[in-house]
């Protein structure tokens, strides 16, 4: 079975560059969503822009995880390229509280943004907001240990 490749963010040379990139992705995604109207049922009205914003925000989550991994000495050419590989790297985190946080926020960003928002063109505003919040918290968790 071939490994499934996930989206990949731009390459960063340092953890600081990677976390800055993560913030930029999240900010760009939020800007995109600001242009999309939400109806009275809590649904975004343009799946094309919503999907794009979710994909960009998810790249922010990956960039944040890459910042952590770069800080731990993993070279760019050995950064994960699949969800399974990212989860394996998270399992190696020694600080159990940080491990739980990284896993929870990565799972929420993957499920809500990558799968439902990006691939399936989900338009539920609460689901997308929860995913965006997960990316924001993931960035903060990583930034705290840089």
Image (cartoon, rainbow, N blue to C red):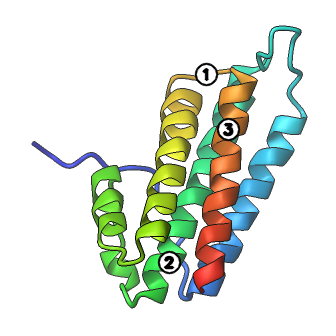
Residue found at the far front of this picture: 97
- Decide: few, some or many residues near mark 1? Use Cα within 10 Å; few <14, some 14-19, many ≥20: many
Of circles 1 and 3, which is in front?
Answer: 3
- Decide: few, some or many residues near mark 3? Use Cα within 10 Å; few <14, some 14-19, many ≥20: some
Where is mark 1, residue-wise?
122
Question: Which quadrant is home to the C terminus?
Answer: bottom right
> Where residue 6 appears, x then y in whole percent?
39, 49
Where is mark 2, residue-wise?
68
Q: What's the CA distance linking mark 3 and mark 2?
A: 22 Å
Where is mark 3, residue-wise?
130
Q: Is residue 78 left or right of residue 59?
A: left
Q: What's the CA distance linking mark 2 and mark 1?
A: 29 Å
Callout 1: helix, strand or loop? Answer: loop
Residue drawn where x is 78% and y is 20% of the image: 44
Q: Is residue 9 visible?
A: no
> Where residue 76 appears, x then y in whole percent?
40, 81
Using the image, determine if residue 143 lies above or below residue 53. Answer: below
Residue drawn where x is 35% and y is 51% of the image: 83
Q: Nearer the viewer, residue 96 or 23?
A: 96
Sequence-wise, which precedes: disc 3 or disc 2? 2
Using the image, determine if residue 101 lies above or below residue 20. Answer: above
CB atoms at circles 3 and 2 under 8 Å apart?
Answer: no
- Decide: few, some or many residues near mark 2? Use Cα within 10 Å; few <14, some 14-19, many ≥20: many
Sequence-wise, which precedes: disc 2 or disc 1? 2
> Where residue 58 appears, x then y in whole percent?
58, 49
Sequence-wise, which precedes: disc 1 or disc 3? 1
> Where residue 142 appears, x then y in whole percent?
59, 73
Callout 2: helix, strand or loop? Answer: helix
Question: Which quadrant is home to the N terminus?
Answer: top left
């Amino acid at each position: 079975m071939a490994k499934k490749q996930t989206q990949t963010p731009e390459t960063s040379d340092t953890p600081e560059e990677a976390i800055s990139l993560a913030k930029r992705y999240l900010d760009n995604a939020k800007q995109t969503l600001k242009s999309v109207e939400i109806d009275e049922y809590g649904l975004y009205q343009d799946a094309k822009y919503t999907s794009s914003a979710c994909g960009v925000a998810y790249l922010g989550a990956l960039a944040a995880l890459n910042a952590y991994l770069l800080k731990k000495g993993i070279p760019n050419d050995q950064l994960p390229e699949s969800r399974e590989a990212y989860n394996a790297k998270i399992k190696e985190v020694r600080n159990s509280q940080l491990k739980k946080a990284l896993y929870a926020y990565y799972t929420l960003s993957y499920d809500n943004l990558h799968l439902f928002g990006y691939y399936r063109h989900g338009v539920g505003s609460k689901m997308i907001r929860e995913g965006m919040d997960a990316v924001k918290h993931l960035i903060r968790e990583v930034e705290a240990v840089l």
